Amino acid sequence: MKHAKKVISLLLALALCACLLAACGGGKNSGDPTSDAPADLLAKIREKGSVTIAMEGTWAPWTYHDESDRLVGYDVEVGQKIAEKLGVEAEFIEGEWDGLLAGLEAGRYDIMINGVDITPERQQKYDFSTPYAYNRTAVIVRGDDDAIKTMEDLAGKNTANTISSTYAEVAEKYGAAVTGVDDLNQTMELLLSGRIDATLNAEVTFYDYMKAHPDANIKIACIDPEETSVAIPMRKGDETASLLAAVNQALAELAAEGELTALSEKYFGTDISRK
């Protein structure tokens, strides 16, 4: 009898130890909210049923509002198709360029789809998907201004772009003084009024602007010989590893299915999804 009591006491003690170990963190990967293990962002996205996508909404034909004030554009449809591949809805949140990457880093957005060029500086802060578009940067000037013929002619000139954009970085690299603006419309107002000498933007954006404003007194002065790769940034870390893999798989499928080519031709009149 005494022996049986000792066995029972021992079993109870072992059970208590097991409970204490679990409470002290023995199950870090079990979904405990106090666990130090990184949360899986893709799992969170699928659990809530939507992926939060940051974009400007003011940069045609990438992301903009049509005559009915509906958010449309190449990146909008790319985002919707990626969401479909992930099995969730696309939730778009618009904001000014300067705050989008910062909001991504702070966790306010899951991903950003807004014609984002891959740069070494950005790669230090964010993980990027495989490229889904390729971009050529145009130097845009007034139609009657022949002072700029090459990228080197930007030295000492005044330009305007959204601060921290690739276009602002390229202008500064060639010696231009960059004025910060909120969006493309404000940039064009400064250019047409003569308050700046030039602005840099995607070549395809220039042609899209001219479709909407055929009488605009602007032209392309030159093209940056360095083509850029456009991809989807997200936060770095183990938390986003499975999301990055899923987005890359979605982009590969969309490319193989011809969807990226079709969207490129729809919005740009040419296929920017291939080099």
Image (spheres, rainbow, N blue to C red):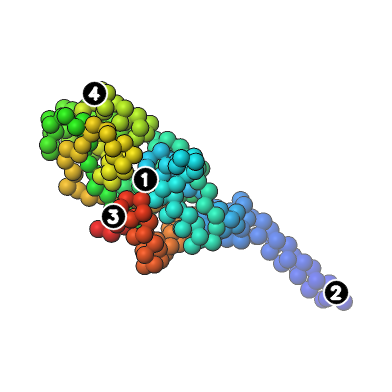
Up the image or down, 241 lies above or below 121; here it is below
First in sequence: mark 3 vs mark 1: 1
First in sequence: mark 4 vs mark 1: 1
- Tell me the number on the disc at residue 244: none
Marks 4 and 1 sit apart, C-alpha to C-alpha, by 25 Å
Residue occupying the point 46% across, 40% down: 67
First in sequence: mark 2 vs mark 4: 2
The picture places residue 164, in percent across and down from the top left corner, at: 33, 36
Up the image or down, 269 lies above or below 208; here it is below
Marks 2 and 4 sit apart, C-alpha to C-alpha, by 100 Å
Tell me the quarter of the picture where residue 25 sits.
bottom right
Q: Amino acid at mark 3?
A: Thr
Q: Amino acid at mark 1?
A: Pro
Q: Secondary structure at mark 4?
A: loop
Name the residue tied to disc 1: 61
Query: Depth-wise, is mark 2 or mark 1 nearer the camera?
Result: 1
Q: Secondary structure at mark 3?
A: loop
Name the quarter where the C terminus is drawn.
Answer: bottom left
Marks 3 and 4 sit apart, C-alpha to C-alpha, by 31 Å
First in sequence: mark 3 vs mark 4: 4
The picture places residue 42, in percent across and down from the top left corner, at: 52, 57
Up the image or down, 99 lies above or below 126; here it is above
The picture places residue 220, in percent across and down from the top left corner, at: 20, 39
Name the residue tied to disc 3: 270
Q: Label 1: how many residues lie within 10 Å, few (<14), some (14-19) or many (20+)? A: many
Name the residue tied to disc 2: 2
Name the quarter where the N terminus is drawn.
Answer: bottom right
